[in-house]
Image (cartoon, rainbow, N blue to C red):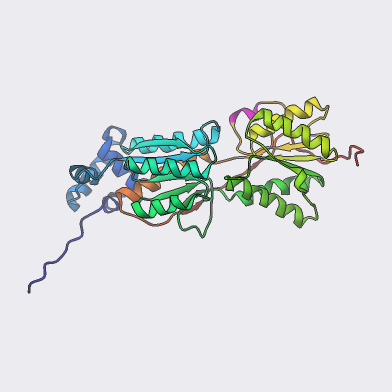
C-alpha cells in the first residue's frame, strides 16, 4: 500500500524566522500593514511567497474557528498600575489585529472564575490573569479549552503556566533591607487585604524573612490590612501609631496607602523622615512630585503588558505552546521619605 508523505504546513514562526523579524511584526503586517515599514513588508511578503504560507487568520476565519480575542481579568481597574499594564497589552494586541475583553474580579477568586467562564463562552484565544493563586475551576477550564494562560505580576520559576512579572518576595525583602540599613528596628506594615492577593502575601513574607534574619520581630498587631485607598492608609497609620508608638519605619503595600500614611504622619505631628520613615510600592506618577517625595519600588507595568501581548501572539499565531517564565526587574527608588532611624524617646 502506497503511503503518502505528510508535508508540514509553514507557520507564522517560520515566516518570522525567514524574514528575520518577530511573529508580532508578521501578524501586524498581515492585519495592519500601514503600521509596518515598507522594507519589512517586502521581506515578509517574500517569506510568505517563498514558504507558501497561508495566514492563520484567513484560514481559520473561513472555518469560523477564530475570534481574534484575548481575555484579561484584573482585581480592580481603580489601580493605576493595572490600568497601565492593560493599556500596553491592548495597544500591542490591537496592532496585531486582536480585541481585548476586560473584566475585574474585585480580589475574589470565585468572581474571577465566573468571569473566566464568561470569557470562554465568547471564544477567547488566550487569557491573562493577575497572580498565580486561582480557583481550581480556572485551571480546569483552561485545560479543557486548551488556550494559553499568562499570569502577570508574579514570577515563579517552577510554575506550570506562563508567568511574566516580578518576584514579589524579593521585592519585599529589598524594601526591608533598605530600612534595616538605615538602622530601623521597630517596623509596621500597612498592607492590602491579604486574602485573594498572593502578591501582597509574598511581599509580606519577604519583609518578615529579612527582618527575622536581622533579629527583628514583626508581631501580628504590627501588620494592618485594609483596602487600597488613601483614606484607609491614613486610618491604618493612626491605628498603628496609637498601639505601637515606638514604630520608626512603616512599609506600605502600595503608593496610595503610603500617601494616606504620610497624611496621618502630619496629623500626628511626625516629621518624615526625621521621626518616621514611610515606603510605598509601584512608583505611580504623582508620588515623585509630592513633598516629601516617596521612597518606593517601581512596577514594570508597561513592559509587562507589552511582553504579555507578544507572548500570546506567538503562542496563537506561531503555534508555539512553550511555557514562558519571565522575571522582570524592579528597583528600589530612594527619595525623601526614608532616613536614618532616630530614637524619639518612646518605649
Q: Residue furthest left?
A: 1
Q: Whole-percent x and y of residue 269? A: 83, 27
Q: Whole-percent x and y of residue 294? A: 69, 33
Q: Whole-percent x and y of residue 226? A: 66, 37
Q: Is residue 243 visible?
A: yes
Location of residue 78 (image quadrant): top right
Q: Is residue 335 above or below residue 266?
A: below
Q: Is residue 301 magenta?
A: no
Q: Residue visible at 25% across and 53% down?
A: 11
Identify the magenta region. 285-289
Relative side of 82 to 94, left or right? right
Location of residue 81 (image quadrant): top right
| Residue in the foreground of this view, choosing between 124 and 301 | 124
Relative side of 43 to 201, left or right? left
| Residue in the foreground of this view, choosing between 105 and 258 | 105
Q: Residue visible at 41% across and 54% down?
A: 140
Question: Which quadrant would the N terminus be assigned to in this image?
Answer: bottom left
Q: Residue visible at 64% across and 37% down?
A: 254
| Residue in the foreground of this view, choosing between 91 and 149 | 149
Q: Is residue 270 above or below residue 347?
A: above
Q: Is residue 304 visible?
A: no
Magenta portion: prevailing SS class: helix
Amino acid at each position: 500500500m502506497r503511503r503518502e508523505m505528510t508535508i508540514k504546513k509553514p507557520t507564522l514562526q517560520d515566516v518570522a524566522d525567514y524574514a528575520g523579524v518577530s511573529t508580532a511584526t508578521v501578524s501586524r503586517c498581515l492585519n495592519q500593514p500601514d503600521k509596518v515599514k515598507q522594507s519589512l513588508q517586502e521581506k515578509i511578503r517574500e517569506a510568505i511567497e517563498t514558504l507558501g504560507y497561508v495566514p492563520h487568520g484567513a484560514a481559520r476565519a473561513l472555518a469560523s474557528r477564530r475570534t481574534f480575542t484575548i481575555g484579561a481579568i484584573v482585581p480592580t481597574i481603580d489601580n493605576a498600575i493595572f490600568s497601565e499594564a492593560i493599556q500596553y497589552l491592548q495597544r500591542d494586541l490591537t496592532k496585531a489585529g486582536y480585541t481585548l475583553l476586560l473584566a475585574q474580579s474585585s480580589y475574589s477568586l470565585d468572581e474571577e472564575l465566573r468571569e473566566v467562564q464568561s470569557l470562554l463562552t465568547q471564544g477567547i484565544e488566550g487569557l491573562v490573569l493577575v497572580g498565580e493563586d486561582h480557583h481550581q475551576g480556572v485551571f480546569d477550564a483552561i485545560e479543557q479549552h486548551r488556550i494559553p494562560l499568562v499570569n502577570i505580576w508574579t514570577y515563579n520559576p517552577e510554575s506550570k503556566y506562563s508567568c511574566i512579572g516580578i518576584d514579589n518576595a524579593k521585592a519585599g525583602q529589598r524594601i526591608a533591607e533598605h530600612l534595616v540599613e538605615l538602622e530601623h528596628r521597630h517596623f509596621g506594615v500597612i498592607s492590602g487585604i491579604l486574602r485573594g492577593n498572593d502578591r501582597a502575601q509574598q511581599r509580606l513574607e519577604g519583609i518578615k524573612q529579612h527582618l527575622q534574619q536581622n533579629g527583628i520581630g514583626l508581631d501580628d498587631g504590627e501588620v494592618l490590612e485594609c483596602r487600597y485607598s488613601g483614606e484607609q492608609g491614613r486610618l491604618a497609620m493612626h491605628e498603628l501609631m496609637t498601639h505601637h508608638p515606638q514604630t520608626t519605619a512603616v512599609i506600605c503595600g502600595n503608593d496610595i496607602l503610603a500617601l494616606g500614611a504620610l497624611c496621618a504622619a502630619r496629623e500626628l505631628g511626625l516629621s518624615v523622615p526625621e521621626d518616621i520613615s514611610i515606603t510605598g510600592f509601584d512608583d505611580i506618577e504623582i508620588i515623585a512630585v509630592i513633598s516629601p517625595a516617596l521612597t518606593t519600588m517601581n512596577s514594570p507595568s508597561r513592559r509587562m503588558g507589552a511582553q504579555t501581548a507578544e507572548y500570546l501572539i506567538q503562542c496563537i499565531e506561531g503555534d508555539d505552546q512553550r511555557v514562558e517564565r519571565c522575571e522582570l526587574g524592579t528597583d528600589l527608588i530612594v527619595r525623601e521619605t526614608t532616613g536614618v532611624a532616630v530614637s524619639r524617646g518612646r518605649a
